[in-house]
Image (spheres, grey):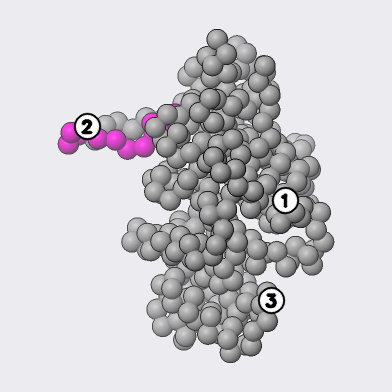
Amino acid sequence: MPHEIKSAETTTSDNRQAPMLSVRDLEVTFQVEDGVAKAVDGVSFDVLPDEVLGIVGESGSGKSVTSLAIMRLIPDPPGKIAQGTVLCDDQDLLELSYDEMRDVRGNKIAMIFQEPMTALNPVFTIGMQVMETVLTHERVSRKEAHKRAVSMLERVGIPDASKRMNDYPHQFSGGMRQRAMIALALVCHPKILIADEPTTALDVTTQAQILELMLELKAKEPGASIILITHDLAVVAETCQRVIVMYGGKVQEVGTVQQIFVDPQHPYTKGLLASLPATRGKRLERLYTIPGNVPSIMEMPAGCKFCTRCESVIDRCRSEEPLLHELSTGQLVRCHLVEESTNG
């Protein structure tokens, strides 16, 4: 019989490297008017050295909440990290004190937040906020911190960066704030960068430049890794080595980029890929859409979370939650149909 797999190591390369970050059985809940909502439900995965790990899924699948839980930034109340471990450098981040976790953020692990309009402090200048990250984590002079902040702002495409250091967030456009936030996250060369939709507010050309910069800085830091959370499957195909597909607060499939894009196994993964624009000759084909909508977090089905939208659903799917089943290829898939086909 298959068993719930707690590690994603089986989807990595044969070198079996020790992970930079190990997330196990992570569960995040929110107290809402109608009761307790489970936004992240038993999520487990590893991030390996030198890896770009993509996390994809529709809005509401639990991607951003998972990343905020890793950073210990879930607002409590109403949110709560109900259980799990997040291991980094043999430390469980969920057990660290506030001051200990402050040393981790921006230094070992940094995060580019999804919403640039609210992530920056409105009462401090852009330069002060980027400099503060350097001064907090490294023993350097204010002059050196200022120099590094200007350099990083220039690298993310802020024109006249030395002068713009004195501007406040409200004086920046949305795209410029996004670049400033990226500079803030990268200025201390973190070992793990969590990028939550890092190029949402940027034009296509700048998106490519920012992604290239992130990969360039990662390459200069031995062992550094990136967790890239995005809706853009094209970006995932170009930049990631492995992909986690989430839906309903659970990991539904894990595999290499090649496995996910060439031979997807879960019906949800297949639906996401089928939704991409495709052409036949010079004619643009009609876009496929996954039937229905993502259920409310309070109305998730008892069985497979995707069963209300799956075109291949069977009775067992509605009543029994499938386990993550490991295939001979190393892919992990949470689907009764895949489990039965591989066993039978």
Marker disc for residue 100: none
How crowded pointer 2 is (Cα within 10 Å; few <14, some 14-19, many 20+) is rated as few
Mark 3 or 2, which is nearer the eye?
A: 3
Tell me the distance, in whole angstroms, between the alpha carbons under discs 1 and 2: 47 Å
Assess whether residue 275 is covered by the magenta stretch: yes
Considering only vertical position in the picture, is 119 above or below 226?
below
> Which residues are drawn in magenta?
270-283
Q: Of marks 1 and 2, which one's residue comes earlier in the chain? A: 1
Which label lies toward us, 3 or 1? 1
> First in sequence: mark 3 or mark 1?
1
Q: Residue flagged by tag 1: what amino acid is it? A: Leu
Q: How would you rate the neighbour count of disc 3 (Cα within 10 Å): few for under 14, some for 14-19, many for 20 or more?
A: some
Q: Which residue is mark 1?
A: 87
Q: Is residue 78 visible?
A: no
Left or right: 72 in relation to 164: right
Q: Is residue 291 above or below residue 218?
A: above
Q: Position of residue 200 (x, y in %)?
A: 45, 56
- Residue 193 is situated, as x and y percent measured from the top left of the image, at 57, 59
Occupied quadrant, residue 71: bottom right
Q: Image quarter for residue 32? A: top right
Determine the residue positioned at 54% across, 31% down. Answer: 330
The residue at the point 62 percent across, 28 percent down is 324
Disc sitting over residue 136 in the figure: 3
Q: In terms of sequence position, does the residue under pointer 3 or pointer 2 come before the other?
A: 3
At mark 3, the secondary structure is helix
Residue type of the residue flagged with mark 2: Arg
Judged from this view, the residue extending furthest toward the front is 15
Q: Are marks 3 and 2 in contact (CB under 8 Å)?
A: no
Q: Which residue is mark 2?
A: 280
85 relative position to 293: left or right: right
In the orientation shown, which residue stands out farthest toward the left? 282
